[in-house]
Each structure stands twice: as C-alpha cells, then as structure tokens.
Amino acid sequence: MTKGRWDKMDNQIKKYLNRFKGASVTEINEYQNITFLLKDKDIKYMLLEGGWRLFDHHKMVMTKSEYKQTEDIKNYLVGAIINHIEISEFNDLKIVFDNHIILQIIADSMRFENWVLNQELICLPGGELTDFL
C-alpha cells in the first residue's frame, strides 16, 4: 500500500471514529454487543470479540476472562459518554468515557475478529484493519 493511500485511509478512519465522540452507551447484551447512540441520533454498535480490559480511574477492574454476567460490565458503561476513541499502532481500540472508565479492546486473536464497529470498521484476525466506509 502506498503512503498516500494509507494516509487517506487513516484520515477516513479518524473521521469515522470522531463520530463516536459524545455518543452514549445505551445497552450491552449477553453477547457483548455494545450499543451507542451518536450525537446525530444514529445508532452504532460494537462487538467485542477479542480480549478486553476495563479500567476505572486507571485501575483495572475487569477483563474478558473475569467477565461473568452482562450486569458486571453494564454497571460501568451504560449511560457513559465517549470522550475519546483511538486505535493504537497495533490496532487495539481504546475508548475513554466521561466517567473515568477506559475500555481497551486488545487485538490478540489470530482466529477471530478482535472487534467490530457496526460492520463498517473491523479488526480482523492478526490485528489487520479493514473498513467499509
């Protein structure tokens, strides 16, 4: 991929992620689908497939392996509003909420998608990003 093509895609992904700023978490179901209501009243969802960690005031409070029931994660995230969302150089997804909660989705799976944003931005097995923007 040429540098110009990568920069254009990178800017397109950044613009897409910026739409999530100010979005609120409205629901989390038992399949670890998180539903976001965006400021423009559009609804998006995120499927957590890979490993994830939840931090409260920079202290880790839960991981996917410790996750027992939907209520555990709902208590932290439902009603929270996104302040910042970014993708690291290794395609981990980090979401910072207004209530000092941070959700980090780790791109660690070689067999399954790591995370999926509304079937529009997907972190594939091995951490490769693909988009349908």
Image: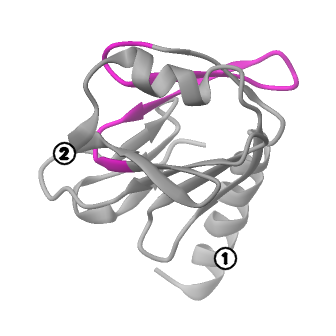
| Label tally | 2
* Image color mode: one colour
Q: Which image quadrant is residue 49 in? A: top left
Farthest residue, direction right? 40
Residue at which label 2 appears: 112
Whole-percent x and y of residue 102? 59, 50
Q: Amino acid at mark 1?
A: Asp
Whole-percent x and y of residue 116? 42, 38
Whole-percent x and y of residue 51? 29, 50
Q: Is residue 31 left or right of residue 60?
A: left
Is residue 102 covered in magenta?
no
Q: Is residue 122 left or right of residue 21?
A: left
**Mark 2 packing: few (<14 Cα in 10 Å), some, or many (20+)?**
some
Residue displayed at 84% across by 36% down: 22
Residue at which label 1 appears: 7
Span highlighted in magenta in the image: 29-52
Dividing the image into 4 quarters, which one contains the C terminus? top right
From the viewer's side, name the closer residue of 19 and 130: 19
CB contact under 8 Å: marks 1 and 2: no
Cα separation, mark 1 vs mark 2, equals: 26 Å
Q: Nearer the viewer, mark 1 or mark 2?
A: 2
Q: Secondary structure at mark 2?
A: loop
From the viewer's side, name the closer residue of 31 and 129: 31
Residue 73 vertical position relative to residue 100 in the rendered view, above or below:
above
Q: Amino acid at mark 2?
A: Phe
Residue displayed at 87% across by 26% down: 39
Is residue 37 covered in magenta?
yes
Q: Which image quadrant is residue 87 in? A: bottom right
Residue displayed at 42% across by 59% down: 129
Farthest residue, direction bottom? 3
Q: Secondary structure at mark 1?
A: helix
